[in-house]
Image: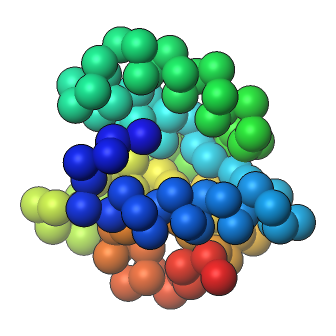
Amino acid sequence: MDGDDSNHNKAVKTWSTLLAGDKRLVTGNYIIVESFALIQNRIGLDAARDFKDSILPLVSVRWVDERIHDAATGAFFAASRRKLSLVDCASFEIMRAFGIEEFFAFDPHFAEQGFRFVS
């Protein structure tokens, strides 16, 4: 959504490919919270509303429950890495719990965890 982002062109191309394909698109509710905060901060409330209205209807949401939150919190503190977020760790736990092997993000932590960038 942010045309000034260094990954914008690659993101648009990958997103278009995903929409044209047969892969099921899944996200976690923590990702949605983080996305709203980043979009609102970087490009404004109208963009956040557009994200809600045009992007979110295209994905299935997996909700972080107490078990996933506890596992993510444990992994977060065990990793003891400043740049690894609780949102990242919750995403990894969701992916493992639901057998998701591919990701669409530009965060190197997903590949470090053994997940593959979507192709």
- For the rendered model, the colour scheme is rainbow
Depth order, front residue of 99/17: 17
For this orientation, the residue located farthest to the left is: 82
Image coords of residue 11 (percent x, y) = 47, 61
For this orientation, the residue located farthest to the right is: 22
Q: Residue sitting at 70 percent across and 67 percent down? A: 17
Residue 56 placement, left or right of 6 = right
Q: Residue sitting at 73 percent across and 42 percent down? A: 59
Image coords of residue 12 (percent x, y) = 52, 58
Image coords of residue 107 (percent x, y) = 34, 67
Q: Residue sitting at 50 percent across and 34 percent down? A: 32
Depth order, front residue of 8/71: 8
Q: Is residue 77 above or below residue 34?
A: below
Quarter of the N terminus within the rendering: top left
Let me know if residue 65 appears in the view: no
Depth order, front residue of 3/44: 3
Q: Is residue 55 above or below residue 119?
A: above
Residue 17 placement, left or right of 8 = right
Examine the image and state in which quarter residue 62 appears. top right
Let me know if residue 49 appears in the view: yes
Image coords of residue 50 (percent x, y) = 53, 22
Examine the image and state in which quarter residue 83 appears. bottom left
Residue 4 placement, left or right of 24 = left
Examine the image and state in which quarter residue 57 appears. top right
Depth order, front residue of 89/111: 111
Quarter of the C terminus within the rendering: bottom right
Q: Is residue 42 above or below residue 62?
A: above
Q: Residue sitting at 30 percent across and 58 percent down? A: 76
